Amino acid sequence: MATDVPQEDPIVLFDGVCNLCHGFVQFLVPRDTEGQFHFASLQSDVGQRLLAEHGLADHDLDSVVLLEGDDTYVKSDAVIRIGQRLGGVYRLLGPCRFFPRRLRDWAYDLVARHRYRLFGQKEQCMLPTGNVRDRFLE
């Protein structure tokens, strides 16, 4: 697993015990053909350190977070920005940013609030394998 990531590389922080969040990461990895994204669970030491460095120290664990240099995206903003960075058909998420954030985040929060009940959860954070392992932060 990686320990240092260049400042310009985007980092996706996710709930490491959530099956939906795990599925989101598993969806991203093969579509990120350039290997631009790095990953860390919100529960990990590095995840907690990164949250604190970006002023999100008391951030709850129900949101995906995208760190892109000094820019921080949470909830629906993070998903939209990840889609834009992936490119291709996922760029179509871009116009969603014109919907009111309050509406987008309400829908995001609704799913987040029920994600364990709907999708289940793991006993521990996922352990990456193969070449993907280098994209996960320790």
Image (tube, rainbow, N blue to C red):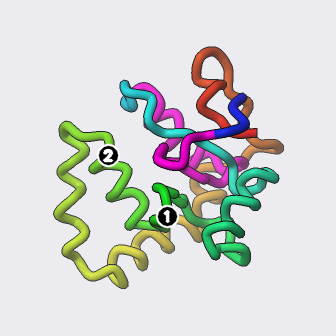
Q: Amino acid at mark 2?
A: Arg
Q: Nearer the viewer, residue 120 or 23?
A: 23
Left or right of 67, for residue 103: left
Q: CA distance from mark 1 to mark 2?
A: 16 Å
Q: Is residue 81 magenta?
A: no
Q: Where is residue 28? Give x, y as percent.
A: 44, 36
Residue in the image at 69% along x and 49% along y: 41
43 shown above or below 90: below
Q: Which residue is mark 1?
A: 70
Horizontal relation, residue 93 to residue 81: left or right: left
* Image quadrant containing the N terminus: top right
Q: Which quadrant of the view contains residue 106?
A: bottom left
Residue placed at 24% from the left, 55% from the top? 93
| Numbered disc 2: secondary structure | helix
The residue at which mark 2 appears reads as 85
First of labels 1, 2 by sequence position: 1
- The boundaries of the magenta stretch are 5-30
Decide if residue 13 is on the left or right side of residue 121.
left
Where in the figure is residue 92, as x and y percent of width and height?
Answer: 18, 51
Q: Quadrant of residue 116?
A: bottom right
State which quarter of the image contains the C terminus: top right
Q: Position of residue 125 (x, y in %)?
A: 76, 42
| Residue at image location 75% in from the left, 60% down from the top | 49
Looking at the rendered structure, the kind of residue marked 1 is: Asp
Mark number for residue 4? none
The local secondary structure at tag 1 comes to loop
Give the foreground label among 1 and 2: 1
Asked whether 25 falls inside the magenta stretch, the response is yes
Residue 60, compared with residue 48, is above or below; it is below
